[in-house]
Amino acid sequence: MLVEVIATVLDNEDDEDGHLVVLQIIEDLMTKAREIFLDHFARLGVFCKVAQLASVSSSTPEPHAKLPENENDVSSCDDAKEVLPGKAYHWKDWCICRGRDCLYIWSESAALELSNGSNGWFRFILDGKLATMYSSGSPEGGTDSTENRGEFLEKLQRARSQVKPNAHSNPILSRTGPTSIVVGNWSLSSHKESQLHIHNSEGQQQATILREDLAGFVFESNRGTKHSFTAETSLGAEFASGWSGKRGKRLRSKIEALRHKVKTQAQEIYDKYFRAAQAQPRSVVAKLGAIVAQLERAVEKQMWSRSSHHDPNLAEAISSLSEVLDQQVSAYEVQSSGLVQALLSLFNNYKYTANLFMQRGQDVGNHKAAVILVHKLVAVLESIEKLPIYQYESPGACFGLQILTRRLRFRLERFPGESSLIDRTGRSLKMEPLATVSQLNNYLLKMVAKQWYDYDRSTFSFVRALKEPNVKISFRHQHDFDENGLIYWIGSNAKTAEWVNPAQYGLVVVTSSDGRNLPYGRLEDILSRDISALNCHTNDDKRAWFSIDLGVWIIPSCYTLRHARGYGRSALRSWLFQGSKDGINWITLYTHVDDCSLNDPGSCASWPLEGNNEESIRHVRIQQTGKNASGQTHYLSLSGFEIYGTVLGVCDDLGKVAKEAEASLRKQRRLLKTQVVKQMVVGARVVRGIDWKWRDQDGSPPGEGTITTELHNGWIDVTWDHGGTNSYRMGAEGKFDLKLASDAEAPANKSTSPSGKSRTNADGVALSKSSSTPSLADKEEGQAKVSVASTDQATSADNLAAKQAAAALTESVLSMSMARAGALVSGELATSDLATIVETLPTPENERSH
């Protein structure tokens, strides 16, 4: 029975896992009971099946090839002690080079980008998809887009292009030991054979492990859990070629590696155990061979001499066959001996042969010879037929249930002549296999039929309700994320429809310090009411914020927050909850200092807004003022928001401020591209610009630097006055990190802190009215700093005040005169830095105070 199972598994095609297990069983059987099982293996044809498995596997290209000349070079070269830009390095089959601000490690299976300033996160490409790894061990693919993948590959190719063609590649850490190589915040070491460990100085216990025999990498999170990421496909020949331009000793994919292992083990077993045994066939096989030869001669003789119908050789052969069939003859032996073909020729040409066969069988005392022959022939047919029989689950197994985990894919197409439904032709749709037709119908209905939020805003039930004269609608908090809040009321159209995320459908407008694109998640995710919190957070920016244009006037009385998931220990600790009428001037409604209400992912908390505040607001903002729960970073993570209070009216110009801000920012970038970039020459003095995201690389407080290279592919090198040097974007990715220092100069007597008013509520909490978020006091440094964005996009683009202010700032970019800049901005700007846009625009109150 065991040998039959082995033979059956070896017959299965494209089952490398099964083949590998069976080959291991054969190896064990040959080691422990060779004489017993060799005969059984021969009877069922295991010898030939193993030989065929080895030969078939060898027809595919081997996943690795030797490069003797490279190996000699490696053995003759000492390991490099450091990784320098412009030089080629390698560890085993992984290539390594250093770029402007990143370390790149890649093979044909995966490519890693380790940012020098990272606190443990890194980007990687695997199976053609771009993702970012965080300390949790769960990669996030929110940035996977054609643009971002292209940007990743462009930076990698730029780093590779700095290495001279045909340059010698230096090995690193080829031997285990305590040696480590430090690049930025990353350290590379090899403490175990054929393993490279990558650690981050701020990443606590997390580590990334590269193994020589793994087409991918292993990530060990801070919790000690290991996650393996293995490539199913190759990144392409360009990555496979490495530094040498030739395919190295690499395993191209998990499947090919498995096939290679099966081929190798099958060849070893056949050479070690089966080759000699196959040369000495079983005695019954030899008898079958003699009978077949005798039958073939009898058939040939009958064809030439038709008068001899009772050939004694034929009768003897049939008698011998009847005796042999009574012995242990397998279907494989019957088929491989050629008996089937010989009997076909015999019975096809002579009708009397059947009677002769029956007669000779009775003469030898075997009355069941014909029955045995039929059984053997049926067994031969069953063993060789290859009909496509689909059996999703074997008897007693549960693997067939896995089919319920595979989603069904559809492509939508609108019926010709249909005009009432939205055209979604070409859209892809995934459906769980257990979803019902009714559920599918309801889902499609929402996609193709106009919903209440697809119509004009004036038709919404909640808008019409708020336009009633002398209307006041109160929303009172009962428990976290109940159905009594304003966000739920707007998303459910005044509780007349099923709730939808109001930010997703433009019912409210969410903006952030990172602009429209967050590192992970979407802007609407901060209003999510899903059972499980989503991963939604800003960049690591000490001035990070989220802002919501509610589109209604409300006197707030309470608000609720929910912490996001995904990034370890990133819950809010110190922040301001602010309100505004215009999205420019903000009133602090609640000050949180080291507030530990939010902790685990998905945890919620609510805060009453007590006091005598009777002023209605339209915009709300969560403004971070200190480090998060990690004590190290400033990621602002939220995945749920609700607000309560009394609503007094509704606004028709929803999102107007954000749209004007975006339009102005685009205009400023166009002007930078056409006017300012031309002046970015070697020796020019620069400061941080509107898209600055590099933290304090320009010093603390921010200082000036000198351009040291010409503009190349949208990048330019700057040496800062405090000594640091790096490359910055001036057109790359459509961003501008710098501007001329002459554009940022301001009179020394110009105020750098916004004027404002402050008042105290009933609990003694100061309510300050300010006009600039970045001008908030930095408690960690104990001093005011010039407000500058440190994120991927202009942090304050969404807070642009008005068209005339944007026009004034645009003129200041073009102006090289301090006096003209002061005149255009009316002498009230805290700084002309484009990163702050117009968050410090003058207000009537400020003008009166002067």
Image: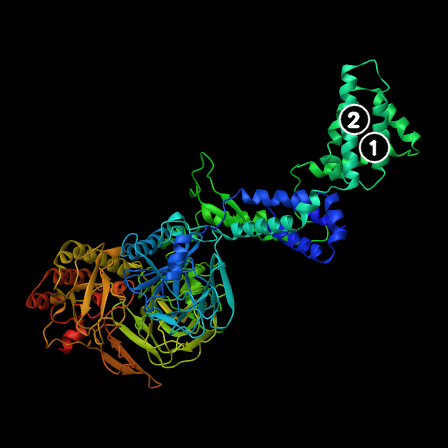
Figure quadrant of the C terminus: bottom left
Q: Is residue 503 visible to us here?
A: no
Kindly check if marks 1 and 2 are in contact, taking CB atoms under 8 A apart as contact.
yes
Horizontal arrangement in the rendering, residue 243 relative to residue 812 (left or right): right
Q: Nearer the viewer, residue 378 or 49?
A: 49
Q: Is 578 situated above or below 552? A: below
Q: Which mark is residue 450?
A: none
x and y percentages locating residue 399 in the rendered image: 65, 53
- Residue type at numbered disc 2: Leu
What label sits on residue 321 in the rendered view? 1
Residue at image position (9%, 62%) is: 815
Label 1 CA crowd tier, 10 Å (few <14, some 14–19, many 20+):
many
Q: Quadrant of residue 838?
A: bottom left
Q: Residue furthest top?
A: 307
Residue hosting label 2? 295
Residue shown at 39%/55% (left/top)?
70
Characterize the local packing of mark 2: few (<14), some (14-19) or many (20 or more) Cα atoms within 10 angstroms: many
Q: Where is residue 243? Give x, y as percent.
A: 35, 54
Where is residue 191 drawn, in percent x and y?
A: 46, 71
Describe residue 76's horizontal placement relative to residue 283 as left or right.
left
Q: Please state which amino acid type lies under the numbered disc 1.
A: Leu
